[in-house]
Image: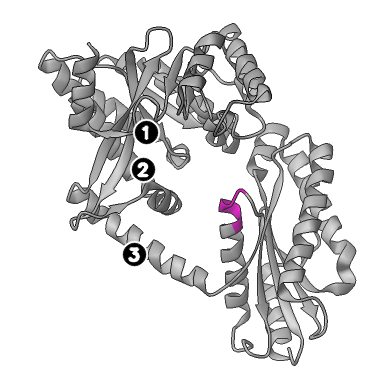
Amino acid sequence: MKDTLTGLDQYEVFLAKLQKEIEEVGDDRIVIVYTDIKHFKYINDTYGYKVGDALLEDFVSEFMKFEDKILCAARVYSDNFVVANRLSPDGLSNEEFRDLIYQVNLERETKFREKYLNSRLQFCTGISVIDKNSRSFDAETAVSNANLARKVAKEMESDSCVLFDQSMMEGIKREVEITSYIPKALAQKEFQVYFQPKIETETNALIGAEALIRWQRPDGDFVYPDEFIPLIERSGQIVDVDNYVYREVFRFLKERIDEGKKVVPISVNVSRVHLNKMHILQYVKELLEEFPIPCSLVEFELTESIYLDNTERAVELIKGLHKMGFKVSMDDFGSGYSSLNLLSKLPIDIIKLDRVFLKEGEMQENDRIIISCVVDMAKRLRITSLCEGVETQEQSAYLKEVGCQMQQGFYFSRPIPQKVFENFMEKSE
C-alpha cells in the first residue's frame, strides 16, 4: 500500500520491510533517518495546502534521488518521513553519515527557501543505527530512537541533525520524573512568581514588570526554567503552570489596589499550547470576575514563534484579549526571520526586541543600525518598543538615544521575588 500524495510506502508496510532487513542485517549497518519540516504548518497556513503538498512532493523527490541506496521509505504522517539505508562495514562511519545528511539538509533548505519564499524552512533529522550488536532491536524501536533524536534536533538552534545515543533515554526518564511531579508541585505551591522590572527609558522610572515562574523544591533546590519549561510544554502542563502565574498576578494586583498601594502593569507569558484549545480567554474572564482589576494592569506576551506556528489562532487570541481591554506584546522580536511580515498582519501593542540585538561587550555599528531602524519602524506603526537583555550603561544610553521607550535587563534588575519587588516599587515612588 502506498501513500496517495507521495507514492511512498505506508508506515505499516515500511515497518514490515524494515523488520525483515533487521533480521538479515549481517555485518552491514541499517541506518534509519527520521525527518520533519520545521514550521511546515506555517507554510500551510500562509500559502495554502496546495503549496504545502507541493513542498512535500518536492521533498520526497529530493531524497529519492538516492533511491539506489534506500532500503525502504515512508511518510509517517503530515510532514514526517522515515527512510532506511544500508551501510557496509567499510563504508562511512555513523558520524560521517550524520555529517553527510546534515550537509544534504542544508542544500535542500537553501533550495526550498528560495522556491517557497520562507526563510524559516528547516529540516530536522534524527538518525539511529542497527548493527549486528543491536539486531535485537525491533523496527518500531529503531524508528522510535530516530524520532527521539529528531525531537532533540528540533529543540536545538545549532544542529538540525542528531545521531541517537543511549543517554537520550536518560533524558526521557528525567522528563517523566518532572512531568509526573508537576501536579504535586502546584498543589504544594512550590512554584513562585518572580518579577523583572521594566524601566521607562526617558525618565528611568519603574513602568512595569514581567512575571516569571520559578520552581523551588522542598529541599531548597531550584529546578531551572530552561529545564522544566520545554518539558511541560511538550506534556501540555504548561497551561496549568501559566494559569497559576496568571492567578497569582491578578491576586497580587488586587491585594495591592485594595491596600491603596502602588501598582504597575505586569506582563505574563502565553505558551503556544494555549492556542490548541483557546481556553485561556475563558480562564482570564473568570479571573477578572474573582479579582476585578483594571485590564490595563495586565499585558499578555506571545513569542514570535507562536505567531509563526498558528497565525490565525494567534490573531483570534489577540482580538479576544483586546476586546476585554488587555494589551498584547510580541516577545523575542527578531529571534526569527519573519518578524517584519508579522508586524504588518498582527494587531499587537508592544514589541520586545530580542536580547540577540544586544551583543556582549561593546556595541557594534551594525547592531546600532538595526536597533535604530526597528525602533523607528515601531514608532511609525504606533507600536511601543521595549528592548530586553540590557546589561550595560552603554546599551541603555544608546536605546535612549534612538528613542526605544522601555528597557528591561540585568542592568536594572534581575528577576526578583514578590517581596523584593514590592520594596523595589516603594523605593521607585
Label 2, on which residue? 239
Instruction: Give x and y (percent) for residue 377.
Output: 62, 12
Q: Quadrant of the C terminus?
A: top left
Identity of the amino acid at label 2?
Answer: Val
* Image coloring type: one colour
Instruction: Give x and y (percent) for residue 98.
Output: 73, 66
Q: Residue at x 83, y 38 (%)?
A: 114
Identity of the amino acid at label 1?
Answer: Ile
Numbered range of the magenta stretch: 153-157
Instruction: Give x and y (percent) for residue 184.
Output: 22, 55
Q: Residue at x 45, y 65 (%)?
A: 171
- Magenta stretch: includes residue 156: yes
- Magenta segment, prevailing SS (helix, strand or loop): helix
Q: CA distance from mark 2 to mark 1?
A: 8 Å
Identity of the amino acid at label 3?
Answer: Glu
Q: Earlier in the sequence, mark 2 or mark 1?
A: 2
Asked if residue 300 lies left or right of residue 291, the reply is right
Q: Are marks 2 and 1 in contact (CB under 8 Å)?
A: yes
User: Within 10 Å of the Cα at label 1, are there few (<14), some (14-19), or many (20+) other Cα atoms?
Assistant: some
User: Within 10 Å of the Cα at label 2, are there few (<14), some (14-19), or many (20+) other Cα atoms?
Assistant: some
Label 1, on which residue? 280
Q: Residue at x 75, y 91 (%)?
A: 27
Q: CA distance from mark 2 to mark 3?
A: 18 Å
Label 3, on which residue? 177
Q: Secondary structure at mark 2?
A: helix
- Magenta stretch: includes residue 62: no
